[in-house]
Amino acid sequence: MAGYHEYLELDRLLSLQRPRTGHTATELPFIVVHQVSELWFKLIIEDIQGAIQALGADEVGAALQRLRRVREVERLLIDQFVLIDQLPPGGFGALRPALGTTSAAESRQFAVIERLSCPPPGPGTPAADPGEDLWSALCLHAQGDGHDMPVDDTGEARARRARALLEIYRQAGPMFALCEALLDHDQAFSIWRQRHALAAARQIGNAPGTGGTTGVAFLEHRCNRRFYPDLWSIRPDLQFSG
Ligand code: HEM
């Protein structure tokens, strides 16, 4: 039977943090926070995929359980920025030459989370493949429950969805709990974006990003992105049921 080190492949794992600048006290936390973030991204992907599958199999309880863990992992991801805030002033500047044009904007897993969460943004954009992202999976599940929840993104479909969502919230059943779980994911991801922009501002001020964007201005613009605009736009019309 494999021992602790073998089971977790710790020799391999712990050999993967290789500071390149000589500023180890600054670069090691920088590398570790990024690597740990990628591990959490991996778990989020696994759980969103699990939630999508569970919805396809009509297992709402299992989907909710997966989404609960997504939210907890997102909380951990957000908390990690305290370590970035504690980099010494000017410390990130000392790492920049080693990074060149590399940026976490290249993170493939981050892009996968965005793709799995909702259909690609844009007016009239149909879902890439209905049921393959969380929002489409929720709409298909709601349809199976008798709700008029079209997946496409035309103005007419949005109006029908808004009516169906108000009914779902009025019923306050399992579909309502699912909608709130998706909103939790959306909100936590938005808080991550805001926290990231703030951490970046503390390190680079108004300097451009290593990846070539305008830096914090670009990140603040990205903060406006919502996975589930329908769930936000119905808020003023929700009735308190006590
Ligand atoms: C010193 C700390 C950090 C700074 C200054 C910083 C800065 C930036 C900037 C300016 C961008 C925009 C792309 C560019 O021009 O490079 C970006 C994108 C990004 N960063 Fe960071 N970042 C930091 C830490 C982190 C950490 C710890 C993570 C965790 C994985 C992370 C994940 C990302 C992701 C996923 C994007 C793409 C965001 C999107 O497309 O909305 N960053 N970062």
Image: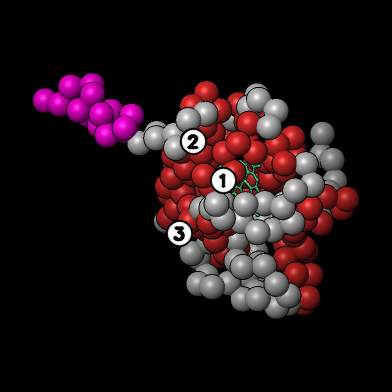
Q: Position of residue 208 (x, y in %)?
A: 72, 52
Residue beneath disc 3: 56
Q: Position of residue 97 (x, y in %)?
A: 56, 45
Q: Which mark is residue 21?
A: 2
Q: Is residue 117 visible?
A: no
The main secondary structure of the magenta stretch is helix
The structure residue drawn at horizontal position 55% and vertical position 52%, both measured from the top left corner, is: 100
The structure residue drawn at horizontal position 65% and vertical position 59%, both measured from the top left corner, is: 212
Q: Residues within 10 Å of mark 2 (few under 14, many from 20)?
A: some
- Which part of the image, by quadrant, shows the C terminus? top right
Residue beneath disc 1: 97
- Asked if the residue under mark 1 is in contact with the one under mark 2, i.e. CB atoms within 8 Å, the reply is yes
Residue 140 occupies quadrant: bottom right
Q: Which residue extends farthest right? A: 236
Which of the marked residues, 3 or 1, is nearer the chain's N terminus?
3
- Which range of residues does the magenta coloring cover? 1-15
